[in-house]
């Protein structure tokens, strides 16, 4: 089954108005080259938090592609909380991404935070750009990105992550700025919020905010990022089940061939094989990760 069929099925449930119909139709066309395995399977974008080396990203992509993942993600420019940490390989990683497409046929996705990032990604032919949570909450940054995207093809796919704090207005405003730049294929990524509560999650999901966003722009594609919600790989299965129960079937999940050695977000990344088990478990009638099985899966090699 083709990805366009999947998106048509996903959005028929919430379709409302001519605007939503136009948005969905353009997504349908642009994802026509991407397929999914089965009607009840999720649409998954997967790959490492950060591109660290060409060998690492190609190895990861080949394993993901073998398991049916058709969109590869990797961060090239990493906005870090404190200086001195790994901040990504930058523009040189774009050629690694292009090589992945040539080897595997996968579509490519990466984060952009400045007009220079946008220009570099457009020149490299990156299929999907996403705007991160630290950027989406800043109207000045969003205005600069929107201006840079005015020269992009109208069918360029841009996904906008929610800002840090719970609420619809800032998130909606960020998305509207990109739409106002003339882009047709704009979607949202729900990655949880920093609410400073005593939560087991790194960024609690606050599902009610995501549902309000859906109501604001009916039919807009919304992808759930359980990796950043969880902060720990052992919590990802439960969040995916919550998302699926609420009607979210599209996910962005971080995957690394050796999570313990990852330079960023090591605790929340899954190996490609573990990710495959997770997807098959959540989206079948088999109970997803009974406690003992979940423990065995994530405690191998001390990867908790």
Image: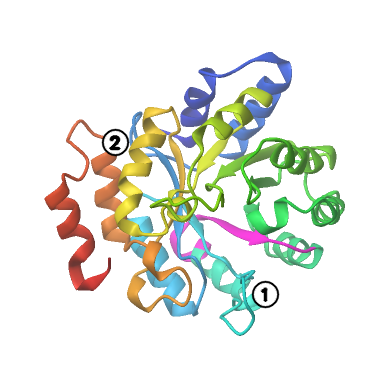
Residue 127: where, in percent of width, then height? Answer: 62, 53
Nearer mark to the viewer, of 1 and 2: 2
Question: Residue 28, image x and y in percent?
Answer: 58, 31
Q: Which residue is mark 1?
A: 91
Is 29 covered by the magenta stretch? Answer: no
- Residue situated furthest front in the rendering: 198
Image height of 37 relative to 24, above or below = below
Residue 291 image label: none
For the record, the magenta segment spans 101-114
Residue 216 found in image quarter: top right
Quadrant containing the C terminus is bottom left
The residue furthest bottom is 84
Identify the residue shown where x is 51% and y is 38%.
Answer: 206
Q: Is residue 130 visible?
A: yes
User: Of label 1 and label 2, which has the lower sequence position?
Assistant: 1
The reply to whether residue 258 is visible in this rendering is no
Compare residues 217 and 126 and report the one nearer the observer: 217
Name the one closer to the observer, 51 or 22: 51
Name the image quarter holding the N terminus. top left
Residue depicted at x 20% and y 73%: 301
Disc 2: CA contacts within 10 A as few (<14), some (14-19) or many (>=20):
some
Query: CA separation, marks 1 and 2?
Result: 36 Å
Per the rendering, the mark at residue 283 is 2
Q: Residue at x 71, y 46 (%)?
A: 156
In the rendered structure, the answer to whether residue 125 lies left or right of residue 288 reads right
On the picture, is 134 further left or further right than 285? right
**Dot 1: within a 10 Å radius of its alpha carbon, few (fewer than 14), some, or many (20 or more) residues?**
some
**Position above or below: 6 against 253:** above
């Amino acid at each position: 089954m083709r990805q366009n069929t999947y998106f048509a099925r996903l959005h028929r449930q919430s379709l409302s108005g001519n605007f939503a119909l136009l948005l969905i139709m353009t997504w349908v066309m642009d994802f026509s080259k991407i397929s999914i395995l089965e009607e009840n399977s999720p649409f998954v974008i997967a790959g490492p938090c950060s591109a660290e080396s060409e060998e690492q990203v190609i190895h990861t992509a080949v394993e993901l592609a073998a398991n049916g993942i058709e969109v590869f993600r990797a961060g090239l420019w990493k906005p870090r909380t404190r200086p001195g940490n790994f901040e990504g390989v930058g523009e040189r990683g774009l050629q690694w991404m292009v090589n992945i497409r040539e080897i595997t046929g996968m579509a490519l996705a990466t984060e952009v935070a400045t007009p220079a990032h946008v220009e570099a990604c457009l020149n490299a032919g990156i299929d999907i750009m996403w705007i991160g949570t630290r950027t989406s909450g800043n109207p000045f940054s969003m205005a600069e990105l929107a201006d840079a995207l005015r020269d992009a093809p109208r069918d360029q796919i841009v996904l906008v992550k929610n800002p840090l704090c719970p609420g619809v207005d800032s998130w909606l405003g960020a998305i509207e700025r990109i739409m106002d730049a003339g882009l047709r294929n704009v979607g949202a990524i729900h990655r949880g919020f920093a609410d400073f509560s005593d939560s087991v999650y790194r960024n609690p999901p606050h599902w009610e905010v995501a549902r309000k966003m859906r109501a604001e722009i009916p039919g807009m594609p919304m992808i759930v990022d359980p990796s950043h919600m969880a902060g720990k790989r052992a919590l990802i299965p439960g969040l995916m089940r919550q998302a699926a129960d609420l009607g979210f079937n599209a996910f962005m999940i971080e995957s690394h061939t050796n999570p313990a050695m990852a330079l960023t977000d090591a605790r929340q990344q899954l190996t490609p094989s573990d990710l495959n088990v997770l997807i098959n478990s959540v989206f079948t009638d088999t109970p997803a990760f009974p406690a003992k099985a979940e423990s065995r899966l994530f405690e191998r090699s001390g990867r908790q």
